[in-house]
Structures are given as C-alpha cells and as structure tokens.
Image (cartoon, rainbow, N blue to C red):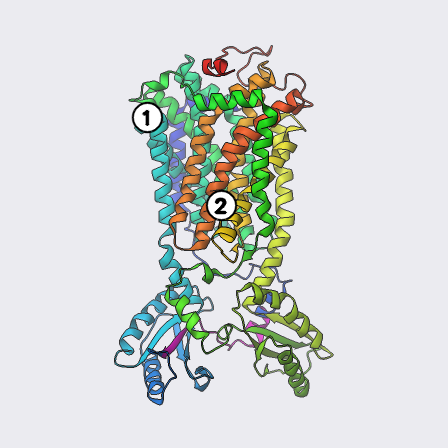
C-alpha cells in the first residue's frame, strides 16, 4: 500500500504539491482563527466540590467581587503607618479611582485594609471581568503600576501590586515571548543540523517550508472543527502545536530522506528510489504516527478539560503531518532528484559511521552486558520518581525580584498569607428552607476553633437558604500545606459540623487545586495504561509479533521513569526546589513517551527488516544500529534542542519542562532506542518476532522468495566484528 502511495506522489509531483498549496490557502483564508479563551467551566467535572462551590456562588452571590490584584502599601522605612501616611494613602487610592483603566471596575480600600500591626495597608483592584488573567486586566495592572509611581511622589509610602493579575503580568514579562523563542530556536536548529548532516541548503530549508505548510493546514482543520462545534481548543494550543509539528514532522522527513539517500547510493534513479523509500519506511512512519495519535487521543479520557481539548487537536496535527510525509515530501524531493543534495558530493558515498558501527558490533557481541548497563542506568534514574512532589504554586517558580513576589512577601508582614484569597465554606439548606441564625453562629465558632485561620461572619443569600464563610488560611493558598488542609482537615471539619438539614461545600483556590490534584492522579491511572495498550496493539500489527511489544513498552516505561526521576534529582534534590510542575508527568508523556516512541519504532522496524532478509539476530542488530543511528541522533538532537532553549528562562517551571523533555528525548534515543532495545532483541533472537516464525518479514523491497535484490553490507560494521 505504501509503495503505491509513494509511486502516485512521485508520478504526479506537481499535482501533489499544488493540491497541498490549494488546501493550505483555502484553509488559511476560509478557516476561522483560533481565539483566546478564559472559560474554565469544563476544566474539572461538576462532580468536584470546588466546581460546585463556584457555580453556587455565581448563582446566589452574583454581586460578590474578588480583587484581580492587590496594591500593598507600606512606609519606605517599613515602620508603622502614621496618620499622615494614612491620609496620603487615601489620596493615592482616590487618584487611582479618578483615572480610567480598561476593564477595571474599582479600587477599594476601607478601614479594615490596614493590618492589625499598623505596618501594611491594602487596596483591592476589582475587574469588570471574572478572569483575572484577561489580557486587558493585566495590561491595566501595568498601567496602575506606572500611575502609582507618580501618585506616591512626595510621600513616605511605597507600594507594590500582587495577586493573580499582577502575577500573570510578571510571569509573561519574565518569560518573554516563549512561543517566539521556541519557534526561532526550532527553525534555527532544524536548518543548522540539516545543513550539517546533508551539506545542502535545499535540504536544510525545504523541510521547514513543508512543515510550515503542514502547520497552516493543521491549524485550519483544527479551527474549522472548533467552529463546527465538534472540538474544543483555543489559541493557547499554538505553542504546543509548533513543537509537535516540527518534532514529528522532522522525524518523519528524516526517516524518509535517510532511506532515500541510502537507495540513491546503491545506484537507484531518484524517482524509483523515492517510491521504494516510501514503500520501505512508510509503514514505519504510519505506525509511529499511529502511536502518537492514539497517545494523544487517550487524553479524551482525562477528567481535566484542558487535556481533553488538547488531545484531539494534537492528533489532527499528527495525522496531517503523516499525510504530508507520505505524499508532499516524496513529491518535492523526487522532483528535485539528485539536485536536492547540491552542492554536496560526499552524499554519494556511504559514511563510515564508526561510532554507530562500534555500538552495533558491541551490542551484537555482548547483548547481555549492554542490556544490563543501559537498563540499569534507566532504572537507577527512575528511582527519583518516588520523591516526586507536584507543585501548584506557580508564584514560587518566579524570580524573587519581581514586584508581585516582593509585594506578596511584604503583605505577609501584616496579614495572613491567605488574606486576599480566602477559602470559601458554603452552607446550603437541603430542603430549600431558611438557615437558622443561631446555627450559623455556632457553625462559625466550630470552624474558627479548628485553627485553620480567621473565619468571617456568615453572609446569607437573599432567600436565606445559603450562607457563605470566608476562611483566611495562615499559609499561602497555593502551597502544599494549604492544599492538604483543603483536601482533608478543612473539608472534614466543615462537613462534620454542618447543622442537621444542611450540607457544607468547600471551595476557593486551595480546594480547587486539591481537586485538580485528585483529578490528575486519577488521569495518570487511566490515561497512561489505555495509551500503553493502544500503542502495544499498533506495535503488534507493525511487527506481526506478540512478544516485541511487551519489552518495547517496558522500555518506554523505564524511559518515562528515568526522565521524571532525573528531573526530580536535579531540581528537588540538587537545586532544592520544593516541588515540580504538577503537569510535568503529562508533558513527559506527550513529548518523551509519545513522540520519543518514534525512535523505538524506527529501530525495531529496521531490526525486523534485517532479520527478514535472512540475517542472524546479531548481524541484524549490527546492521540496524549502524544504519539507523544517524537518523535517530539527528531527529533527537533537533527536538531536544528545541526544548533545551527553555533552560534559558528565569522561570524555574519552564526550566523543569525544558530539561525534562530535552533529557528524556536524549535518553530515549541514545540509551533506549540505540542500546537497550537492540540488546534485548538480540537476546531474544527470533523469539522476539513470535508468532511471525523464522522469517518475520519478507522485508519491504525483498523478492517474494525472501531474498534481497540488493544487499549492501557496511564494510566498517563487518570489520568491527
């Protein structure tokens, strides 16, 4: 089938290229743009308590206003505020009120805004929209900061802004344009590495143009699906689409070009060589893409709305990339023929691949030793997983000199850490009747006696059937301790103390993060196994074996553990971070497990092909490693280098993401795909292909009798044995 697809694209190259351009232009003009959105209604299912609290608050207390940001005032000498300071403070707040800021409803400061110790005063900035991360709100916070500098001139006061909108602003400014940085780094790495590998400007530039065209088609299809109502996605997915498309796109192009170049060296004409290259590696590319697609689609089983929306969109992008690899790439390069390699001449002769040949020879000669060392390394690194501590406090990852971080620390000199972001306890009558005031007072005393923090008086709904209490925790709402309190003691106390005939619900930031943590853990236990089983089925179909998929997935599991464990060792144990980004396992799953599996598939498909040609297991491993190492290495360096750029960011969570993916890809490529998998395959011998028999495949491009029409054998690989 794949040979036929390749022949069709090669025979009609201009028609194939024109069809892709027409589709890209049509989607570029006709498809709607992906829009930013802040709708998190489906982030968690409604069964979670924090979501129920949020919806009940919107229904019963629509007038409730939570500040999007907070201005923290103090004296320049950090002493107690004097009467003159308080007068200046009122004038500054009045000055802010008099100015018009986009999407800012009011600036509030009352008698209770001064701390009990008299050193700190607060002013709440209330937005006209519910989302504190709205771009208009964050820009207004930036304007408010500039206005404060002028208004504070001539006073003894200094001020800083903190809170969600201020933290979001500082996060954006400290990270810079991450999307642009990733895109530029990706393009530069692809061009430079392809130029080094092929020594041809055309081959360095054309893959970038092809993937760019693929990106237009993929985003057009995704946005069309969103508009039709069958898919949920927004513009925030653009950054991850860039990495996925360039990652898998470069992999598939390299898989094809390396085999194409190999056939040209053997004397084939360009067009037959490209057709045969598609026939030989087309199934491998399709299987690799299929593994990535099912891994992404498994995210549909997630209970987190963000991941459910991400999965299908990424699957569409990989499917489009697969179609381009099997049609557009063959059409472009077959049309150019040998001119694609201009002005390079060394491409005509086989490189010596000294390192790869030695690695293949060692694996063939001592497979037990190689398997023990490579597997042992991955297992040792994976031990760090047991110390993994998910962190939800994004502010703690920011540089300490940012205004929102400093202002948040200053606020705690006068107020409890949860002052501006309390946990909410709602008491609701089960029969819809009015709640008794005496019961509410008793309930408040019981909450206060538990010692979680200050408890505000009950605010009762107009119907009297719902009462709300604010619990100001003594610890930061996003800290591990606050999440533990919300998930356990606070909820237990609130539920147990609820008067007869009523039910208690606990919400707020701490409770929401506790529910997200629970949902994330649930997703790990469901999504990962389902994806693993689906990938095993694909591997079984590709290899016609029920044995190989098992050890391949065990190797993938080791690689996942080693990647996460290494990140724990570096950031938690060596650098002393309190925890790692809570979504890091999902990120490793997306980019290391899903995309990195490409390298395993390429290697094991080549092993099967070489075995099918009649070679012994040792000879097959030697030849497969020698032939495949350059492809795997080039693809891995490009993807790892793309994420490695994030190590330059000041945000520690971006650094964690960059290191985990970059290091994980390198482990997958150079330890797992080039050492562990070939070594285990050698140890198992022909049993690895059971029930495929002694000749698991006639080999793509082989004669019907199983013999090979052209059997190149690497001289260096021979001499190394």
Q: Which residues are magenta?
A: 55-74
- Front in this rendered view, residue 576 or 621: 576
Q: Secondary structure at mark 2?
A: helix
Look at 63% across and 63% down and name the residue there: 48
Residue 221 image offset from top left, x and y in percent: 46, 44
207 over 480 or under it: above or below: above
Q: Position of residue 310 (x, y in %)?
A: 52, 49
Q: In the displayed structure, would residue 268 be above or below residue 81? A: above
Above/below status of 112 relative to 216: below
Quadrant for the N terminus in the image: top right
Q: Which residue is mark 2?
A: 660
Residue that mark 1 sits on = 199
Crowding near pointer 2: few (<14 within 10 Å), some, many (20+)? many
Q: Position of residue 233 (x, y in %)?
A: 49, 52
Residue situated furthest bottom in the rendering: 83
Q: Do the residues under discs 2 and 1 have CB atoms within 8 angstroms?
A: no
Q: Is residue 61 magenta?
A: yes
Query: Which label's residue is closer to the chain start, 2 or 1?
Result: 1
Q: Is residue 147 visible?
A: yes
> SS of the residue at dot 1?
loop
Cα–Cα gap, marks 2 and 1: 31 Å
Which of 357/86 is in front? 357
Does residue 567 lie above or below 707 as drawn? below
For residue 266, side relative to residue 443 (left or right): left
For the residue carrying disc 1, how many other residues have a C-alpha within 10 Å: few (<14), some (14-19), or many (20+)?
some
- Visible residue check, residue 4: no
Whether the magenta-drawn stretch holds residue 314 is answered as: no
Residue at x 69%, y 81% (from the top left corner)? 433
The one nearer the camera, 312 or 393, is 393
Residue drawn at (65%, 87%) of the image: 437
Q: What percent of the width, then of the height, locates residue 67?
A: 45, 73
């Amino acid at each position: 089938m794949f040979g036929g697809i390749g022949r069709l694209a090669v025979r009609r190259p201009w028609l194939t290229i024109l069809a892709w351009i027409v589709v890209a232009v049509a989607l570029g003009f006709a498809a709607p743009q992906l829009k930013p959105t802040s709708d998190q209604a489906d982030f968690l299912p409604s069964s979670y308590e924090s979501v129920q609290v949020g919806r009940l608050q919107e229904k019963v207390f629509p007038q409730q206003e939570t500040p999007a940001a907070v201005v923290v005032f103090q004296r320049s000498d950090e002493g107690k505020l004097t009467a003159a300071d308080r007068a200046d403070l009122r004038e500054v707040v009045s000055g802010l009120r008099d100015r018009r800021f986009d999407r800012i409803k009011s600036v509030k400061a009352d008698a209770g805004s001064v701390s009990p110790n008299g050193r700190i005063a607060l002013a709440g900035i209330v937005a006209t929209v519910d989302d504190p991360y709205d771009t208009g709100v964050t820009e207004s916070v930036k304007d408010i900061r500039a206005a404060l500098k002028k208004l504070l001139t001539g006073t003894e006061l200094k001020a800083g802004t903190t809170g969600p909108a201020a933290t979001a602003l500082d996060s954006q400014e400290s990270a810079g344009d991450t999307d642009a940085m990733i895109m530029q780094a990706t393009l530069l790495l692809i061009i430079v590495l392809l130029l080094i590998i092929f020594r041809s400007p055309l081959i360095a530039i054309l893959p970038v143009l092809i993937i760019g065209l693929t990106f237009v088609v993929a985003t057009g299809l995704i946005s069309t699906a969103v508009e039709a109502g069958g898919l949920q996605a927004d513009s925030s997915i653009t950054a991850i689409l860039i990495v996925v498309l360039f990652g898998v796109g470069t992999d598939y192009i390299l898989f094809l070009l390396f085999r194409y170049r190999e056939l040209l060296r053997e004397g084939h004409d360009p067009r037959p060589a490209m057709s045969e290259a598609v026939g030989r590696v087309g199934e491998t590319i399709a299987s690799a893409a299929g593994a990535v697609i099912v891994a992404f689609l498994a995210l549909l089983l997630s209970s987190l709305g963000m991941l459910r929306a991400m999965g299908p969109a990424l699957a569409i992008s990989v499917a489009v990339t697969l179609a381009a690899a099997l049609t557009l790439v063959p059409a472009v390069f077959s049309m150019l023929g040998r001119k694609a390699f201009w002005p390079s001449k060394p491409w005509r002769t086989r490189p010596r691949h000294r390192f790869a040949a030695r690695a293949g020879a060692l694996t063939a000669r001592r497979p037990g030793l190689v398997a023990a060392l490579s597997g042992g390394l991955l297992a040792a690194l994976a031990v760090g997983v047991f110390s993994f501590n998910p962190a939800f406090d994004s502010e703690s990852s920011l540089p300490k000199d940012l205004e929102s971080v400093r202002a948040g620390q200053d606020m705690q000199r006068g107020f409890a850490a949860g002052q501006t972001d309390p946990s909410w306890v709602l008491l609701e009558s089960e029969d819809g009747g009015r709640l008794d005031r005496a019961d509410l007072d008793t309930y408040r005393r019981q909450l206060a006696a538990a010692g979680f923090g200050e408890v505000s008086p009950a605010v009762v709904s107009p119907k009297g059937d719902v009462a709300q209490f604010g619990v100001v925790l003594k610890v930061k709402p996003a800290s591990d301790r606050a999440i533990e309190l919300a998930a356990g003691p606070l909820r237990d106390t609130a539920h147990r103390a609820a008067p007869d005939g009523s039910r208690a619900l606990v919400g707020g930031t701490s409770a929401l993060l506790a529910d997200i943590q629970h949902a994330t853990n649930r997703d790990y236990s469901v999504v990962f196994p389902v994806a693993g089983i689906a990938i095993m089925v694909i591997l079984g179909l590709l290899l016609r074996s029920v044995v190989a998929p098992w050890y391949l997935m065990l190797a993938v599991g080791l690689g996942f553990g080693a990647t996460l464990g290494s990140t724990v060792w570096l950031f938690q144990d060596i650098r002393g971070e309190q925890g790692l980004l809570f979504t890091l396992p999902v990120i490793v799953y997306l980019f290391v497990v899903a995309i990195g599996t490409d390298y395993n598939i390429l290697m094991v498909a080549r092993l099967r092909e070489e075995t099918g040609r009649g070679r012994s297991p040792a000879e097959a491993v030697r030849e497969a490693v020698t032939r495949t190492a350059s492809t795997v290495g080039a693809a891995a360096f490009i993807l790892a280098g793309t994420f490695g750029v994030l190590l330059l960011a000041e945000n520690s969570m971006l650094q964690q993401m960059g290191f985990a993916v970059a290091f994980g890809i390198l482990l997958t490529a150079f330890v797992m795909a080039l050492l562990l998998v070939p070594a285990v395959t050698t140890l198992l011998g022909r049993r690895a292909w059971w029930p495929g028999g002694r000749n698991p495949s006639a080999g793509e491009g082989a004669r019907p009798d199983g013999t090979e029409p052209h059997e190149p054998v690497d001289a260096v690989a021979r001499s190394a044995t």
